[in-house]
Amino acid sequence: MSRFFKIIISVFLLIIVAHASAQEKESRTSRRNKKKARKTELTKVSGEIATDTIRSIDTVSVVEKVVGYERKTITLTSIKDSVIVVAKDHPELATLDSIWKRELYNSDLFDTLYNSVQTLDYKPVEFVELPTDTLKARLAELNARTPFNVEYNPSLESVIKSYLKNRHEHLERLMALSEFYFPLFEQELDNHNIPLEIKYLAIVESALRPRAKSRVGATGLWQFMFGTGKMFGLEVSSYVDERMDPLMATKAACQYLSSLYRVFGDWDLALASYNSGPGNVTKAIRRSGGYTNYWNIRHNLPRETAGYLPAFLATMYIFEYADKHNFKPKRPRFAYFETDTVKVKQMITLEQVSEKMNIDLEELQFLNPSYKLDIIPFIKDENYVLRLPLEKVGAFVANENQLYTIAQAELNKREKPLPKFFEASHRIRYRVRSGDYLGKIARKYGVRVSQIMKWNRMKSNNLRIGQRLTIYPRKPVTTTRATSKKTSVADTQSKQYTVKAGDTLWSISQKFKGITIENLKNWNDISGTGIKPGMKLKLSKS
């Protein structure tokens, strides 16, 4: 009986297992069919995406697949009468990406490098990982394949070892940025027949930060002063600073460096003059007794320039031998040649492009650094362009009419009007008024308090009424003098002006549009410059 009972139980269990297996098989078949149908639906939807509409978006459904960090989210979204597929990254990995992007794009590199060049002391540095004999051999190898004088000397050894010991993290981040900029630099340097190693100059100049600005106002990747930039075609306006445009500034830097090399016939001296000006280099040559080797005239150069070439050569060495010193730089998401430009047909902001094209604003600012207010203006006869990752260019062009319509509608709703376009001067002199403080002045001109202090060599935040401050404004500011209107010549016909106390011929000429000091002297038979209060001056020939 017991044996028969065991047989009955075994048969019953087998029936249960078989039934469960059949159900599981049916469930798998059902899921496979649903997945196949869904795939067909996605394919159909993707093939029907329209590119002529950008309107409100409605989420239709979400499909998820989770395998550790392989999780991906596909969201079907409806745009008016069409549907697109949006792929979302794993949130944890997206967070990691954002962290390294902040590291890559932040601005402390410029301040760190800028200060290090000025404070080099050339004291011996203990760095056992790089024996002196090894360094000498590598410098000799580098010297043989570059037009620069890279021969060993204790000062250069000190700078190289100091950088390796104290700047490892900073240099690793610069190496990551160089992956983006160096292909652009190399192409332009080659076009101008300039040594490709000069690409390292931009690291010393700006730490590869397009919006870098020095305490004296030098701006951009190649640190152009306002006047020098103008000489080489770089314009500055209320909206745009072409010194901060990577391509335009690189072209200008190549032209400038070529002209300096034609003067000195030596790349070391050309780089020194790029930093301090040709006049300082020729004076240093005279003071040294006619030497033309950089290392022989270095003690006669300004302090910053004295550390300039050693910093350049040290940077060159470290980049060329990065694999020997355990550098592991993170790589940018794309290289410069993986981007392209679109000429704008109407004013649009980077924020609008970011929102409508689903691109990080930080990424757009990185790609379009020359737009000071994050606004791309549309000016007749000017070619202002928007730089985008390659995969976004087609979508922008296909939808640009709708994008401009939406952008214009949003701009029309602004509470405050946009600033007017005008050519900016290289700097302003601000007179401190009652109630002023540095934060207030900084906000007015779109700069930082620390920048105002640096430009004016201030050691504290204290201000005094009447104090003059040098400011390189980022925001366009209309001053009373700039907006004051002169009376036109037509309004002064047959009129006279009564001289007041304190008037001069120059001050009177400034009050009337089209009238010069010579006009006033000729029309009123004045031989000198002396005028007296109460005199009646003609303001026209008749």
Image (cartoon, rainbow, N blue to C red):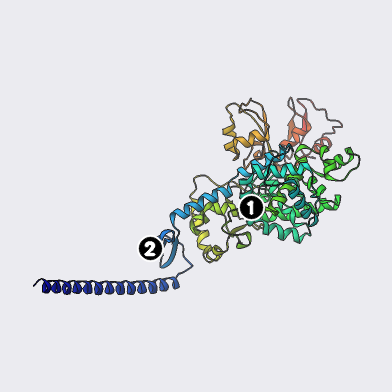
Q: Position of residue 428 (x, y in %)?
A: 68, 37
Q: Quadrant of residue 445?
A: top right
Judging depth in this view, the residue of 335 and 508 nearest the camera is: 335
Q: Position of residue 186 (x, y in %)?
A: 71, 59
Q: In the current view of this chain or complex, which residue is farthest to the left?
A: 1
| Amino acid type, residue under disc 2 in the picture | Glu
Q: As displayed, is residue 109 above or below residue 9? A: above
Q: Regarding mark 2 in the picture, which secondary structure is present there? A: strand
Q: As displayed, is residue 108 above or below residue 68? A: above
Q: Which mark is residue 64?
A: 2
What residue do we see at 58% from left, 29% from top?
437
Q: Quadrant of the C terminus?
A: top right
Q: In the current view of this chain or complex, which residue is farthest to the right?
A: 289
Residue 411 showing in the rendered view: no
What residue do we see at 65% from left, 28% from top?
459
Q: Quadrant of residue 178?
A: bottom right
- Left or right: 78, with 206 as reference point: left
| Amino acid type, residue under disc 1 in the picture | Met
- Left or right: 268, with 235 as reference point: right
Which residue does the numbered mark 1 point to in the structure image? 175
What residue do we see at 43% from left, 65% from top?
85
Q: Position of residue 217 (x, y in %)?
A: 69, 41
Judging depth in this view, the residue of 440 and 362 nearest the camera is: 362
Which one is in front in this view, the residue at disc 2 or the one at disc 1? 1
- Tag count in the figure? 2
Q: Position of residue 228 (x, y in %)?
A: 76, 47
Q: Residues within 10 Å of mark 1 (few under 14, many from 20)?
A: many
Q: CA distance from mark 2 to mark 1?
A: 37 Å
Judging depth in this view, the residue of 154 and 291 nearest the camera is: 154
Q: As displayed, is residue 10 above or below residue 372? A: below
Q: Quadrant of residue 162?
A: top right
